Amino acid sequence: MPEFKKHEVISSKASEYTLDESDVSKIIDATSSLRDKIILELLAFTGCRRHELCLLRIKDIDFTNERIFMPTAKQGTNPYNVLREIPFINNNLKRDLQSYIEILKAKHPNIGNEDKLIPLTTTMVSIIVRDTAERAGVKSSNPKRKWIQPHIFRHTFVRYARKCGMDYVSIQEIVGHADISTTMGMYGKPTWADKVTEAKKMERYSRLQ
């Protein structure tokens, strides 16, 4: 895939507030129920928005082809008109979803595949994330935030996707940005840690005298 030219990157404030891998693990491990664990895993391993998570239906989980059909919520439109495919990148998420759905159907025989996977409000999701992060002892890297909010997992997902070499178009499709310039504008600018890592590649040059 060809590289994007510099002029294609829009000027935008990069989102540099993310979580370390260890902090993501700590928060997931601190969940108090299987339902809450799935909420954190979905946020961490799909890059979804919290309102999309709340719209997710049982039928949107495709275990056979190992993918999730994520509703793409846009103001004034039916979120189920556009379902973006997200591959399972974490085996624990797949396993936990299977267990959760089995338990859900056993407890509620009348539940159908059209029903919501996690019937909670976005506010309730935010509270679960906040309380779980506090229990794990993880604080927000954003000095303007007193606690961890769901959206930081989305930023973390994209940052690590780029770090692992995923191309911008694939990231755009997975996280549901309408325009590639949004993806590149928000995440195209390297963080300080990225710059340090790249600069170390010049070690041989730095030894010249």
Image (cartoon, grey):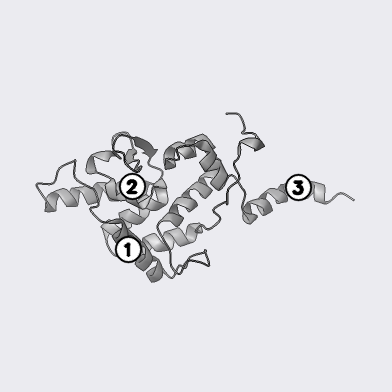
Pointer 1 with pointer 3, Cβ within 8 A: no
Q: Mark 1 vs mark 3: which is more N-terminal? A: 1
Between marks 1 and 3 in the image, the one whose residue lies nearer the viewer: 1
> Closer to the N terminus: mark 2 or mark 3?
2
Image disc number at residue 195: none
Closer to the eye: label 2 or 3: 2
Q: Residue at x 33, y 41 (%)?
A: 70
Is label 2 in contact with label 1 (beta carbons under 8 Å)? no
C-alpha gap between disc 2 and disc 3: 42 Å
Q: Which mark is residue 202?
A: 3
Q: Can you identify the residue that label 1 sits on?
A: 128
Residue 208 shows in this picture: yes
Residue matched to label 2: 52
- Residue that extends furthest to the left in the rendered view of this protein: 110
Residue type at numbered disc 3: Met
| Residue farthest front in this picture | 76
For label 2, the crowd category at 10 Å Cα-Cα, with few meaning under 14, some 14 to 19 and many 20 or more, is some
| Foreground label between 2 and 1 | 2
Q: Between residue 143 and residue 65, name the one nearer to us.
A: 143
Choose the circle earlier in sequence order: 2 or 1.
Answer: 2
Q: Is residue 184 found left or right of 28 in the rendered image?
A: right
Q: Dot 1 surroundings within 10 Å: few (below 14), some, or many (20 or more)?
A: many
Q: Amino acid at mark 1?
A: Ile
Residue at the right extreme, as displayed: 209
Cα distance between the residues tagged 1 and 3: 44 Å
Q: Up-down: is 203 above or below 77?
A: below
**In the picture shown, does residue 84 fall above or below 160?**
above
Tell me residue 81's x, y (percent). Answer: 30, 34
Badge 3 crowding class, 10 Å Cα cut-off, few under 14, some 14 to 19, many 20 or more, is: few
